[in-house]
Image (spheres, rainbow, N blue to C red):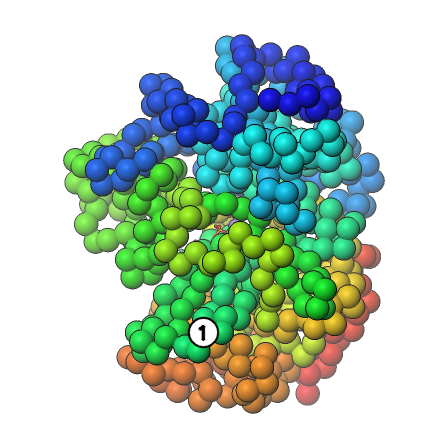
Amino acid sequence: MTNNKHVLSWIEEMAALVNPTEIVWIDGSEEQAEALRAEACSTGELVKLNQDLLPGCYLHRTAVNDVARVEGRTFICTSKKEDAGSINNWMDPKECYETLNKLYKNSYAGKKMYVIPYSMGVVGSDFAKIGIELTDSIYVVLNMLIMTRVGKNVIEALGDSADYIKGLHAVADCDESKRYICHFPEDNTICSVNSGYGGNVLLGKKCFALRIASYLGRKEGWMAEHMLILGVEYPNGDVKYISAAFPSACGKTNLAMLIPPKAFKEAGYKVWTVGDDIAWIRVGEDGRLYAINPENGFFGVAPGTNDNSNPNALLTTKEGCIFTNVCHDLDNNTVWWEGLDNNPPKNALNWRGEKWDYTKYDKADKVGTSGAHPNSRFTAKAVNCPCLSSEFNSLKGVPLSAIVFGGRRAKTAPLVYESRNWQHGTFVGSIMASETTAAAAGAVGVVRRDPMAMRPFVGYNMGDYFRHWLDMGKKIPNAPKIFHVNWFRTDDEGHFIWPGFGDNLRVLLWILDRCEGKVDAVETPIGFVPKAEDINIEGLDDVTIDTIRELLTIDNASWLEDVANIKEFYAQVGDRVPAELYDELAVLEANLSK
Ligand code: GTP
Ligand code: SPV
Ligand code: MN
């Protein structure tokens, strides 16, 4: 498919290592994709679902030990350890390549090598970057066809250039003790072995579009962030854009596809989705920040997605979708997950592929008893999304009015607050914390610091990443304002106080009003919070102005506990934490102690 000698010699070298039976170039055609689906069905790698109800849809189950990203086995391999920093796992590149090469050796024996040329961003646009992934998995090929822009035009856009990200993936034995997700930012290379799960193997996503891209962004003066991008359309037709960073499984897809509450919808408000997970952001000629979504599909959390919470996401999955680790309803050959509806299938297989008894479901042991894995996913085409923004394929991106950070905090963080300026906003991002979720292997529900929702995704030293944020601020004459939200505050019984989902628009509208200087705010030790009466609660049954007051309270004592924890975290990040952030921390502590 190409005469590019850099590409050809690299593929030759990798093929000599992994030893496939054949090398197959993925050209992006429907015929080839269909043949691969048929092949995957014949081996059981995919299950073809009911084509009347779910045309073009398939089910896949990963290995039981391979259902989420593995942060403990994810490495940033820079020549100097300090450049990866203390928050990342680090390995010496030479040592790492040696370890990997042993695992890769002959790992494709008896299998084909698929060569996937893909573009993150619209092919040939200024924002776009090219990758080539080599994989032994048809599941990976079919997911990449949905999640990225794949095909001949990518290879044409690359031409003779060596400027692409190399990715080598092998499911190999799927041995979790030998699983490695390694990044070599100095070599533009990603190596993934012994996994077949999404974020570990769809190398365009977290590995390239966040870890490698964040490294490139720092070098080249732009930003790669774990952010959704949405447009709020006002009744008069104006559209204002917001990007928002929430940790994995903390509500990005849901917010990006939000349906306004009834009264707002009737008044003419709409929300348009530009992206649900990743934003690449640059300074535009007018001094504003412009964002694109480098992806071409959604790899969304299935559980909890339903007709009320996110009908747009559900509609997006109705055609050409791959479901991973959901429950298989054998009666009508469809899929199900917890929170889809109240009718769990009686004759079904769980995410492990075992006969499933829904009456045994125990909330306290979701992984053990649920039909769908808590981190089960759908891979859906962006074009299927009913609320896809007309700017989805925009070459220059959308101008950001606001940047929003948010975490999953049962206490402490209020519903919304606004930072005082870019530097303070960077501080607010740097002190984000959230309860861990099933999106990564390990304990769930533990509060950890997750700066800018990027803790698992910064491809270099976290202190340098904070510095990059501060430096960017100086290059943006018309910078967006920076906010923090928390949809997850709970009452004494552990119930969410704020209804969330569509009603989050009420908070977005306050944020945008602030950006336009249309509404006042109250200054607090942590930043500006709304006057309770400025959050529109029209049409909400269970929320009164007192509920809003409660959601906006700032408890100095628990914030001071947070300050202590932030100090520990900054110390852990190490000596590259910018002095400006320590200044902000001192101001916060002083404000809280007054
Ligand atoms: P990744 O794809 O892992 O990056 O996740 P994400 O940030 O896109 O999260 P997603 O929107 O898929 O939501 C994850 C979980 O949070 C789902 O179970 C949702 O039902 C739940 N959730 C999302 N928004 C809200 C909200 O506003 N309130 C509450 N209570 N739950 C929410
Ligand atoms: C996340 O974990 O933030 C995801 C899913 O979006 S994964 O692709 O596995 O990273
Ligand atoms: Mn994500």
Instruction: Locate residue 121, reporting x and y percent.
Output: 59, 46
Instruction: Locate residue 511, reporting x and y percent.
Output: 53, 77
Instruction: Please state, as top left, top right, bottom left or bottom right, where the N terminus lies in the image.
Output: top right
- 246 versus 298 height, above or below: below
- 487 versus 418 height, above or below: above
| Residue sitting at x 44%, y 48% | 382
Residue type for callout 1: Gly
Task: Examine the image and state in which quarter residue 351 appears.
Answer: top left
| Residue sitting at x 39%, y 52% | 385
Instruction: Please state, as top left, top right, bottom left or bottom right, where the C terminus lies in the image.
Output: bottom right
Instruction: Locate residue 190, reporting x and y percent.
Output: 66, 33
Name the foreground residue: 581 vs 226: 226
Question: What residue is pinned by disc 1?
Answer: 237
Name the foreground residue: 535 vs 451: 535
| Residue sitting at x 27%, y 40% | 54
| Residue sitting at x 17%, y 40% | 346
- 325 versus 530 height, above or below: above
Residue 181 visible in rendering: no
Give the side of residue 208 with respect to residue 488, left or right.
right
Name the foreground residue: 19 vs 197: 19
Neighbours of disc 1 within 10 Å: few (<14), some (14-19), many (20+): few
Instruction: Locate residue 523, reporting x and y percent.
Output: 61, 87
